Structures are given as structure tokens and as C-alpha cells.
Amino acid sequence: MRGENKRSVIVGIFVFVGIAILVAGVLTLGGQQKKFVKAIQLKAVFDDIGGLQEGNNIWFSGVKIGTVRKINFYGDAQVEIEMNVEEEVVEFIRKDSKATISSDGLIGNKIIVIYGGTTLAPAVEDGDRLESVMPLDTDQMMETLQVNNENLVEITGNLKNLTSKLAEGEGMVGAALTDSLLAENFRAIVNNLNQASINSNRMINELKSFTAKLNQEGNLFNELVTDTTMVSEMKQTLVSLNTAAENAQKMTSELSTVTEKFNSTDNSVGMLLNDPELAETLRSTLQNADSASYNLNRGMDALEYTWPFNKGFKRKKKAEEKENN
Amino acid sequence: MTEKAADRKPLLSKKIDKFFTGLADAWNFLKRFFKEVFVPPYEFREVIHQCYRIGVESLPLIALTGFIVGIVFTNQSRPSLSNFGATSWLPSLIAIAVVRAMGPLVTALIAAGKVGSSIGAEIGSMKVTEQIDAMEVSATNPFKFLVVTRVLATTFMIPVLVMFTDFVALMGSFLSVNANENVSMLTFFVQVFESISFLDIISSVLKALLFGFTIGIVGCYKGYNSSKGTEGVGRAANAAVVMAMFLIFIEELLVLQIVNAIRMM
């Protein structure tokens, strides 16, 4: 009897542990698949769901927040997806959020990804329909890939032509690769460039030392840059220069008037400078004056020996001799 | 099949007649089981005893088998998955394989070998030594005491054993995955439960119930209908194992179709 009781207890423990494993599994599964979590329903309409199935996951910001509840045909061959979304994340999903179909890994199950949404829009409510964005279709991707392939074929063809031309020494680059003279010239150019870079380096160094000198205190340029009193003095100098320039301008304008007058013949100086008749008259007058003065000198010489004037000349001569002695 | 029936001229051929007669006998045996199972007196004590023998005593063998299956299946799957860099999918793959198919199947096959043969041999030996007739004479219902209790015990113990097998197989798989991929236990079990669904667990339990019932009923039927002395006992034990295993595979196929149809709905 005691042995039977023992067996009963062991069988009880055995069954209990087995059922405990089952219950733990069910609860874990339910917890992980959000079966026992309060949820709201959201909807989205797609043209093509690409094999999405009921029970597939809903992701928001990379976190699983629910599952696909139901898939129905809608309108004109479109598909309406009903989603169970956890109530506790609803506040983060906005009414202007979008839903698209993606894949869990490269070859994984299809999932619905909710993304976007601004804080300006209110949070979603039970039964709301999200804007759907059609995912990239594999066929479209393949079509684009085919265009890329064709381009690639064309590019490689061109590259082939180009390299064959290069190998044959055609064109400038081909010649550069194959012509030894050109290579030599190129080497010379490079040498020159090298020399130029050395010179430019030296120039930079000199410029550097020059700027260092400029930065030394007591230097004119340094004072120009740093001395604040010099600026006001220079301003005053400039004002004075400006005044001098204005005066010079005035003077030149007056000089201009004078020269204009000099050029005209309505005044005596102008006539002197410009009138040829006056010049001729003046010349003859001067000649007359010259001959008159000559005659006058002869008269004076004659007068020296003429009475009573000769006495005066003698007295003057004596006074001069006395002064010289 | 009675001796009177065997002496009769065959309807189609002796073998075909024998097959259909056996089918009719099995059907009658099944009907009798369902008739007896709900009618008192209930042999609770014997049911507990059989549960102990079938469930508890089979646990070490089945747990060890499950553990080895988990490790071996993981190690066999790894090269195929690593070919395209998907070894991170090992937990999901093992979970689906173990929970949906291997757990119930391995448990049922081991139980068919161990329990089915012992039931067939035990009842067969009782039959050939006329202990069953003696029980009838002593006003004890041998069908209720021998068949109903064993069938109930296998029906209820196999699902419990399946739970143990699933758990142990997943632990074995975890050890392998942990050793090779450095995956933590939490990550492993998160991925395991990520890949399976309630339908998988429910179908697994229902399959286990069906497999348990099959093992029990086939073992009892073969033992109850054994004849020709000790040779018949061995034949009954052997037939119980072979027939139970065959039926388990057939049932697995049918249940898979039904579950897949439900999954698609």
C-alpha cells in the first residue's frame, strides 16, 4: 500500500513537472508574441503585400510592438492589413506615421515597419488607418539592376577601347605612356615643377621672415598697424594734403586763365608773346634804340672833350684814382 | 478471429480475408475500449500504476534520447546553415524541428519500442497462460483492468514525456549552440519562442495524445489477441511495436496536413 502511494506521488510529480514545462512554454510564448498584452488595432492598405502573413511582426523603431491580425482584400484589388499594436507604445506612434512592408533580415519573414510621424500630430487611436508606403519591389530592383548591368557592359567596352588605344600609343595619354621623348619632356616638366616648388618654398620663407620683420616693434609698418595716434596724424596730414591739392587746383585754374590771356592778343603781354607785327616793331625799335645808344655813346665821348663838360670828367677821374690808391 | 471463421471457405483469398477480419476485430476492440472507458468501476489505482511504469520509468531513456537528438540535430544542421552565414538561425530551426515534429515523434517511437512491446508481451503472456480467462471467471473485467488502464496511461503519459523531451532536446541544442556560437541561454530561448506558435504547441500535444493512444491500443490489441503459446507472445510484442510505429508515421503525416491547412487559414 505504501509502495502504491509512493508511485502515485512520483507519477503526480512527473505529471506536474511535465505540465509545468508546457505552461511555462505557453506563457513564455504568449509573453514573447504579445498574446496576452492589451492591444489596439491599426490598419494600412497596400497594393501588394509580397507574401506577408497573419502573425507576422510589426516593428516600430526596431522594436517588435505587435503582430498582423488579419489580411483582407479591399477596394479594387488592394489589401487591407489589420495590426494588433501594444497599447503601451501607442503614445509614440503618431497619426501621420507611415507603414511599409519590409523583411526580417535578408531572407527572413516579412514584417510591417511603422516609421516617421511628427510630434505635431496626435497619437494614433484604435481603428486608425496609417498611410502606407509601397516597399521596393524585387522585380523593380531587378529591372534597375539590369539597366546597371547594361551600363556596366558599355563602360567595360569603352574601357577596353581606351586601354587598347593606350597600349597602341594613340592619343596624348597613350603617347605619354609609350613615347620616350615625351616621357623625357614630362620628366623635365616635373623637374621644373620641383624647382618651382623649391623656389616657392624659399619665397614663402622669405615672406615669412619679411612678415616677422614687419611685426617687429619700432618698424614703420608695424607702427602703421599698431600705433593708434599715427592714424589721427595721418588723417590730419591727409586733410592738409587735401587742402593743398584744392589750392593747387585753384592755382592751376588761375594759371590756366593767365595762360589763356597770354595766348590771346587783347592785352599787352599776350601781344608781346603772340603778335608778330609787334615783335617786328619791337625789334626795329630795339635796333633803333641800339643805334641811338651807340650814337649817344659817341656823343658822350665827344662831350668829354668839349668845354665846359671836360672839367667835370676830369674831376671824376681824379676822384676814382684817389679812391683806388 | 475464431477457429470457426478460419475453417470457413475464404471470401476473396485467405490473406485478404485475414486482413479485413483483423481490421474488423481492431474496430470492435476500439469500440469496446470507448464503451468500457466511460463505464464504472474505474481502475484509478491501476491507471496510476501504469502511468508510473509507462511515464516515470520511461523518462530516463526518453530524456537521454531527446538530449542526444537535440545535440545531433544541431550539429548536423550547422554546416548547411553556415554555408550561407545563417548559423544564428539554429535556435529557430531546432525549435521548429523539435516542437513540431521531432519531440512527439522521437518520444512516440521510443515509447512504442519500450512500452508498446512490454504491453503486448505482458497481455499476450497473460492471454496464453489463460490469466485473462481466470480474471473473467473471478468477476473482474479483464478488458477494463488490463486494456483501458494501459491505454489511458499511454494516452496521458506520452504528452508529458513529449514536454520533457522537447525541453531536454532544446537544452541539448543550447549546449551545442552555446559551445560553438557563444549564444546566451536567454538569446537562445528568445529565438526559440520567436519561431514557434501556439498552433505548434497545441498540435504537438494533440499529436502526443494520439500517438500515446495508438501505442496503448495497438499494444493491448496485439497482446489481447495473441495465440499459439510463447511464440505468440513474442509475435504479439513484435507486432505491437511494428504496427504502432507504422501508425505513428501515418498519423504524423495526416496531422501535418491538417495543421498546415489550419496554419494557412
Image (cartoon, coloured by chain):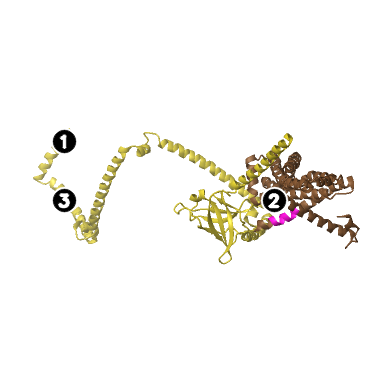
Chain colours: A yellow, B brown
User: Residue sitting at 11 percent across and 39 percent down?
Assistant: A315
Query: Considering depth in this image, is A176 or A81 the residue closer to the camera?
Result: A81
- Label 2 resides on the chain identified as B
Query: Considering depth in this image, is A246 or B186 the residue closer to the camera?
Result: B186
B138 over A280 or under it: above or below: above
Tell me residue A29's x, y (percent).
Answer: 62, 47
Tell me residue A240's x, y (percent).
Answer: 26, 44
Specify the quadrant that holds the C terminus of chain B: bottom right
Predominant SS along the magenta part: helix
Q: Which residue is mark 1?
A: A321
- In this view, the residue farthest toward the bottom is A76
Q: Which residue is mark 3?
A: A296
Cα separation between marks 3 and 2: 169 Å
- Residue B206: give its label: 2
Residue A238 part of the magenta-drawn span:
no
- Label 1 resides on the chain identified as A
Cα separation between marks 1 and 2: 172 Å
